[in-house]
Image (cartoon, coloured by chain):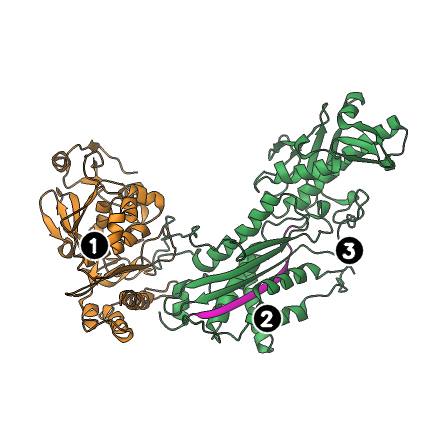
Amino acid sequence: MHPEASVTLEIAVHTMAMELGMTPLEFYRKNLVTDDTKNQDNDRAMTSRSPRVCLERAASYIGYESKYHAPGARTLSDGRMHGIGIITHNDRHGNTSEGRGVVVYMNSDGTANFVTGQSNNQVGCNSVGLAVIVAEALGLPFEAVVCSSYGTADQAPDGGSQAGSRGASSNGTAALNAALDIREQMFAFVAGELEVSADDLDARDGVIFVKTDPSKFMTHSDVMSDIDGPIIGFGRSHAERGAIGGGLRKPTQGEEVGYDAYHREGVAAAYEVAVDTETGEVEILDWIHVLDVGRILDHYSAEGQRVSGMWVHYNKTFLWDVKYDPQTGTELHQTHVENKTATHMDIPEPNGDKNTAEALELIDAIGPFGAHGIGEPSAPPGYSALIMAINNALGGEMIKTRPVTPMVILKHLGKA
Amino acid sequence: MNKINTHVNATSIDQAVAALGANAAVVAGGTDLYGSLKGMIYPDPPSTLVNIKTIPGLSYITEEGGMLKLGALTKLTDIAESSVVAAKWPALAAAARHVGTLQLRNQGTIGGNICQSVRCWYYRAEHVGFNCLRKGGPLCYMVPGNSERGSAIFGAAGCFAAFPSDTAIPLLALGATVVTNSRSIAMADFYEGLDNVLDDNEIVTELQVPEPASGSKQVYMRWAQRKALDFPEVAVAVVTGSGGTSIVLGGISPVPVKSTGAEDAVSGGISESSATAAGNAAVQGATPLPASDIHMGNKWKVQITKTLVKRALLAVA
């Protein structure tokens, strides 16, 4: 769900909760589907595990149950109003698209190259994310796998839309399937050379070995020296190896991956704020942002995505706005002085035991090795939670406009 | 970008003055002027730029006989970090510290900061999008237009653009004097109508700031939407002394305002009630611009101004 829609929904949720005499947390707990709930259309299980786990972690961290109060009911010792907000939802971004492709080439020295039509736009989604998938499936060290070409339709298979949320699950699935194609070819060759069944083999650190007797092995380099002809793997983001339409990826390489349910990314966020009713300024006292990322493929990128979500929360809540001249329609904020984005001095970034962004690896049922996209989901819940925290501080009729600038708050208070 | 026909790297004040004229502009740090030229905001842009950074000896911070002297080319960073300034003129140091970003403060000068143009988004609209009153046009577009930011609640000569300088506010409160190549001008007389009173062939060379009286307290506060890279929507400097309390406001009119009403309100001393009264007095007679369906107007500045005046006074009480 996109941020603006999320805020609109949460205004409705919070209104319902208040009408029912419940806290928003109680409302969520009562209404989130349970683990035995099934999709009435296809009878597949719909787990509530991910949103629930994220919600409970956010509530616990921020101390929601002890700090919640009726809207506008708590004044801090310095005269500012205290507010707290919490949001969770099950984000449906990051679904798996059909028909994306990846091609993996084994090189004569036992290393691998691959090509994808996906741009490398998410801080290394190809050079790290897809490379990790290929390396893991082939049993090669990470450094032995290189994305040699990407994003060009002349040389690479279709990479789908160049957007963040579907890359890991769709192109990642294609990469995994391409690598498994190679794995099958190489295992078949090694099985013949070692006179064992391919099912008895495993691969790790550049070596294909017999599981019951690792002293019997061939390196990937050995295979490429001895085999007659090239080894190329083709993978698509669908079907036969178990993405959408083909059931769950369970088991994969002898391990069960994923829960017997369909969900994308559960996310939750909580904010605690102090609102200065004389200036309309909001200080963020603490925040938490919890994302079920499925499986982390790249810690650096996952960390960046979690923390950068907070920047979106802040900017959308307080700054990003479009200003027009009412008579001519001319856009007035023509530079970054007027069209404001927060600076590092504005953002309360993670700092010791305050302000935190956490990733939970709850394992996606469909994505490669349990991973799924985290492109958009980091934005909506925190944006909503921050606005709801401000509303909790102020009381009265809920502020529904965005951004919630100090000017808007002063107007809400009858001071502007 | 506007075409510049002549660029003069002046090596002396006299050479710079000789190169100036009605269609020339002085460049020091350039952080204001270059943005204006790039945006092509002027219907009649300067064709000659006179670079005064090449004039030696105009960047210094000295204290002589109880007088702080700042060369016009002194960088804002140097003022913000100066132990001399911090010791006796902390409000000025604070104001310098708030300007723009570190990069801008490393480039921008004190002379330029007090002479910068307003940040009104109609005045700054690219390609002379709005030929406003300041450019010889028929009206101030803030009045019928979107006045939510960068606007004044006290208009002057029909203009509602807000004065954007940080450092001018404490300099005026501290009783500074502007020295140019031809005269000395008290800060109280430096701004008039919509702008400063510099002639076309006049260049600021020095700022002189008298030492505050013993026991004097001073503070500078400002309100902006961001903590950096933002001009003050409201700014206030308060300096106390044996002769009374000086209260100067920025961001609420086209030039700085010395609020005598607010000063009178605390003439008997600063307390919670007198500070509140001073805040109310500071906005007495304000004519905030109205809201419309798509913008908030600027009545919110009245509230911010009252609050900042009160808080600044209580900070020095």
Q: Distance between the residues labelled 2 and 1?
A: 51 Å
Residue to which mark 2 is pinned: A65
Percent of width and height locating residue B101: 35, 47
Q: Which of B79 and A319 is in front in this view?
A: B79
Locate residue A144 relative to residue A77 in the image: left or right: right
Question: On the image, numbered disc 1 is attached to which residue?
Answer: B171
Give the image quarter of residue A279: bottom left
Side of B49 relative to A146 (left or right): left
Rendered orange, the chain in question is B
Magenta range: A80-94
* Chain in green (letter): A
In the shown orientation, is residue A121 left or right of residue A212?
left
Looking at this view, is A404 or A108 the one in front? A108
Q: Do labels 3 and 2 share a chain?
A: yes
- Tag 2: Cα neighbours inside 10 Å, few (<14), some, or many (≥20)? few
| Identity, as a three-letter code, of the amino acid under mark 2 | Glu
Residue ID for mark 3: A260
Gap in angstroms between the C-alphas marked 1 and 3? 70 Å
Q: What residue type is labelled 3?
A: Asp
Whole-percent x, y for residue A379 in the image: 55, 55
Q: Residue B195, image x and y in percent?
A: 19, 53
CB-based contact (under 8 Å), mark 3 and mark 2: no
Residue furthest front as drawn = B214
